[in-house]
Image (cartoon, grey):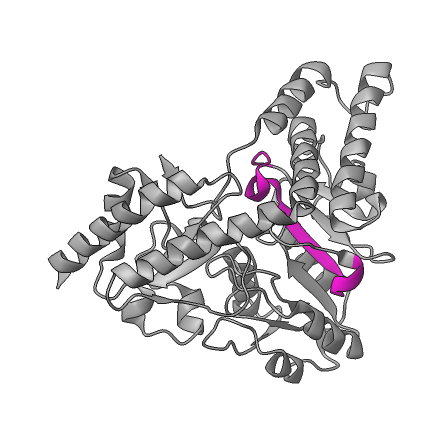
Amino acid sequence: MIDLDANATTRPTPAVVEAVVRALTDCCHNPSATHRAGMNARAQIELARRDLARLLNARPIEITFTSGGTEAICHAIRGVLAGSARRAVVSTPIEHSAIRLLLRHLADAGEIDLRLAPVTRDGVVDPGGFADLLDEHTALACCQLVNNETGVIQPVGEIAVACARHSTRLLCDATQAIAKIDVDVRTLGCDLLTLAAHKFHGPKGAGALWTAPGLRLPPLFFGSQEMGRRAGTENVSGILGMAAAAREAAAFLADHAARSAWSARRDRLEHALLRAIPGASVNGRAPRVPNTTNIAFPGIELEVALMSLSERGVLASGGSACSSGSLEASPVLRAMGLPEALASASIRFSLSRFTTDDEIDRAIPIIVECLGRVGSAES
């Protein structure tokens, strides 16, 4: 199986699996217990908090562990709104569905005034257009760091400057950026940042919310765990697995040769498909993370194409895995101005950092053959 769907999820590394197993066996006691075994579990959680904070250039006390990126996003959005008299929220139409659908729900319920910033044809949020929507009524702004479907890096720094002028809190979903590019909360300029472990070779069911110093959010539900921020007995195995993934991610990001090789593999796949398949074009040619390409293949039927690839042992996606089963064109690609016919005929290929040259060499002819066959059948 050649997995080119790494933006959907990644396989835990051996070190992560070892950390999870060790937590389930050696740290199985309740971290809130006052006996020695419980205190040992607590100590391991705090070491994990330090490791994740180091990856973000944050302080450990600023990290709250959650069940994943979606919970972290919900906590951030509802928490900021609960603590503000302002009712306006500025966001973008290319956010992950965890943000996009929650904000739409709140807007439909009359709880917020939702304003969406424009996006360019290359998939970049227009920072000037975003800034124009901010005013004294804006409680929260949301802008992802990396788009999950195109891999395009967003101008969060510029948007953060505009938010600061209006004392507006900025939430940055960094889920698709962690372990692909350097993420430094001290220079990024946001007030809140979310992530999920399984996107960078950690376990599912573990994530985190970073909050800027001095920002205190009310919890989603109440309890004494996580310094009163997040109730429920901590997922020790998930947290320790995420910490192992964070340590490995930091080592990878420090290896510039490995990062360049990763990008070169993506480029080789992309260029080969553009050369071999008539009419193919890349969606989002702005600066991207090194592992992602989103390509439109005119004339294909997306569901049939993805199934054909899967049957030949190549995994890819039509967009966000959280939207699987949907026959509608990608909201991200449509927000970029793609005609529905092209948005409905676009495939995301995303490499993990363990994707090999050999896998790329084997995948290219399979993709060309499958898409050529599907395209011919549909035309």
Q: Is residue 226 above or below residue 189?
A: above
Seen at 67% across and 14% down, the residue is 25
Q: Nearer the viewer, residue 31 or 237?
A: 237
Please check the rendered image and state whether residue 199 is part of the magenta-colored stretch, yes or no.
yes
The percent coordinates of residue 134 (x first, y second) are 68, 80
Q: Viewer-proximal residue, 160 or 121?
A: 121
Q: Nearer the viewer, residue 211 or 276?
A: 276
Q: Residue at x 52, y 58 (%)?
A: 96
Name the image quarter holding residue 315. Answer: top left
Residue nearest the viewer, comparing 205 with 181? 181
Q: Is residue 255 magenta?
A: no
Q: Which residue lies at the image location 79% right of the left edge and 27% below the top edge?
A: 44
Give the answer, above or below, for where 23 lies relative to 209. above
In the image: residue 161, left or right of residue 201 = right
Give the x, y percent position of residue 127: 63, 78
Say above or below: 198 vs 285: above
Does the image show residue 70? Answer: no
Q: Quadrant of the C terminus?
A: bottom left
Residues in magenta, as a range: 186-205
Q: Position of residue 254 (x, y in %)?
A: 70, 46
Q: Position of residue 36 (x, y in %)?
A: 86, 15
Look at the image and tell me in which quarter the N terminus lies: top left
Q: Quadrant of residue 302?
A: bottom left
Q: How many marks?
A: 0
Q: Is residue 284 above or below residue 133?
A: above
Question: Which residue is at a point 58% across and 70% down the rendered structure image?
Answer: 110
Residue 251 visible here? yes
Say left or right for 82 vs 363. Answer: right
Residue lying at the far front of the rendered structure: 257
